[in-house]
């Protein structure tokens, strides 16, 4: 009888690289619970929790949420998932965050989606959000059934300010400065696996094949 080992993974990549879509597929095929730091932050902001109000004060000023605030939020949530396989998306974004995560949990694999910045710039301008749930649509490869309307609720979709062309370049430069060192950190630890491509459907088969060496595909029983 094989002892069940808890599998913990992180998915990384520039904004607009397809992390949400790939994460959803990983969750479906490998029974990993997906935790998005962005979704968790939005939930806390909407509920006006203590940590949500602190985070909102930085977000409203166009600043990144400080390491200690986001780290506290994420680690609290992960502690509730201690006996589950999980996939963490959007965290860590800095080396101090990665160190704090390592001190709390053993990370088995870090998946890096390496998508060219020019591709991302084109993709982000086609991205629309359902603000209440955080559901993401893309008019090119994951469109809503009705233009600018959420499939589930029928409510209007919006385009976030930071998805507009004039702000995308700034976001990508910020990612490069903050998160590249995190990839180097995980590379040195020997847990980083990079997948390159311009489309999610091009990258996914390689991610799937790699994870099948780590976990069973629950859809193939």
Image (cartoon, grey):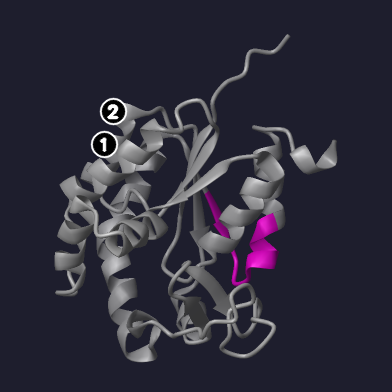
Residue 195 belongs to the span the image colors magenta? yes
| Residue at 55% across, 33% down | 85
Magenta-drawn segment: 194-204
- Badge 1 element: helix
214 or 84: nearer the eye?
84
* Residue 205 falls in image quadrant: bottom right
* In the image, residue 5 above or below residue 51: above
Give the image location of residue 187, x and y in percent: 40, 42
Q: Is residue 114 visible?
A: yes
Disc on res. 103: 2
| Residue at 79% across, 43% down | 219
Query: Where does label 1 land, which residue?
Result: 99
Give the image location of residue 213, x and y in percent: 69, 34
Q: CA distance from mark 2 to mark 1?
A: 6 Å
- Badge 2 element: helix
Query: Callout 2: few (<14), some (14-19), or many (20+) C-alpha neighbours within 10 Å?
Result: few
* Residue 190 falls in image quadrant: top left
Name the residue furthest right.
221
Give the image location of residue 70, x and y in percent: 25, 50
Quadrant the C terminus occupies: top right
* In the image, residue 220 above or below residue 130: above
Residue 72 belongs to the span the image colors magenta? no
132 or 37: nearer the eye?
132
Disc on res. 213: none
State yes or no: discs 2 and 1 in contact (Cβ < 8 Å).
Answer: yes
134 or 179: nearer the eye?
134
């Amino acid at each position: 009888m094989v002892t069940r080992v808890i599998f913990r993974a992180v998915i990384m990549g520039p904004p607009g690289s397809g992390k949400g879509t790939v994460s959803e597929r990983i969750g479906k095929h490998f029974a990993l619970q997906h935790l998005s730091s962005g979704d968790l932050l939005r939930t806390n902001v909407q509920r006006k929790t203590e940590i949500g109000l602190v985070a909102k004060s930085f977000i409203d000023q166009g600043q990144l949420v400080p390491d200690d605030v986001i780290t506290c939020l994420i680690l609290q949530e992960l502690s509730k998932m201690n006996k589950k396989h999980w996939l963490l998306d959007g965290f860590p974004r800095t080396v101090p965050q990665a160190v704090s995560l390592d001190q709390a949990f053993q990370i088995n694999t870090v998946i890096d989606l390496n998508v060219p910045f020019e591709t991302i710039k084109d993709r982000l301008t086609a991205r629309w959000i359902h603000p209440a749930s955080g559901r993401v649509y893309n008019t090119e490869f994951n469109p809503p059934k009705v233009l600018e309307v959420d499939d589930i609720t029928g409510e209007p979709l919006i385009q976030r300010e930071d998805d507009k062309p004039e702000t995308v370049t700034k976001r990508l430069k910020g990612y490069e400065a903050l998160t590249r060192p995190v990839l180097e950190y995980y590379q040195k630890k020997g847990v980083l696996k990079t997948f390159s491509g311009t489309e999610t459907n091009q990258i996914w088969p390689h991610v799937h094949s790699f994870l099948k060496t780590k976990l069973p595909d629950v859809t193939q029983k």
